[in-house]
Image: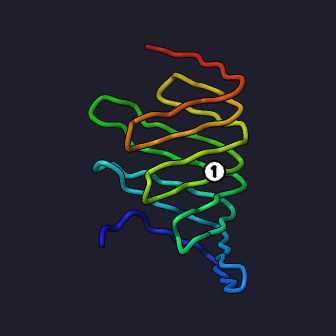
Amino acid sequence: GQLYYTLHAKHFSHYPQLAVSRLDDVDLELRSDGRIFHSTADHADVHREGEEVFLRDNVLVWREGLDSEPDLTLEAETLTVWPRDQRAASDDPVVLRQGTSIAHGQSMRADSLFGTLELTGRARATLQP
């Protein structure tokens, strides 16, 4: 099979009756189109045998820029990731930074397969060249 992501945690508990694994101090590494997305969070719940990862509390996602492109970071309180589908979403406010540009949104949807990131709800951005 293909490796979609790796997940590291300082503490791991599995609850078979709930079909959920709970993790603390989480580091999620997701591979997409030759790029690596790093995500950290205080806690995570893994559902559906790893098909859905719900990160919560102090979520930080970053991706190294290519060539002269600056790194990209995303901050949120929660983020749901579907690693095989290469999608992510948050229903909480997010802050997106790339270089000196910054964007805020009430929520967010991202799809790496289609190369889209959509800030939803009230959004504002300051874009720098």
| Residue sticking out furthest to the bottom | 16
* Quarter of the rendering occupied by the N terminus: bottom left
What residue does disc 1 label? Answer: 79
Q: Nearer the viewer, residue 74 or 45?
A: 45
What is the basis of the colouring in this image? rainbow
What residue is rendered at 57% in x and 33% in y? 96
- Please tell me whether mark 1 sits on a helix, a strand or a loop: strand
Residue 80 x %, y %: 61, 53
- Towards the viewer: 126 or 93: 93
Q: Quadrant of the C terminus?
A: top left
Image vertical order of residue 8 relative to residue 69, above or below: below
Residue at (61% x, 69% y) in the render: 46
From this view, report whether residue 91 is shown above or below residue 98: below
Instruction: Left or right? Give the position of 85 relative to 123.
Output: left
Q: Quadrant of residue 3?
A: bottom left
Residue 82 position in % (x across, y down): 51, 57
Q: Residue lying at the far top in this picture: please name it.
A: 129
Q: Residue at horizontal 64%, vertical 76%? A: 21
* Amino acid of disc 1: Leu
Query: Who's the residue at 38% across and 63% down the image?
Result: 4
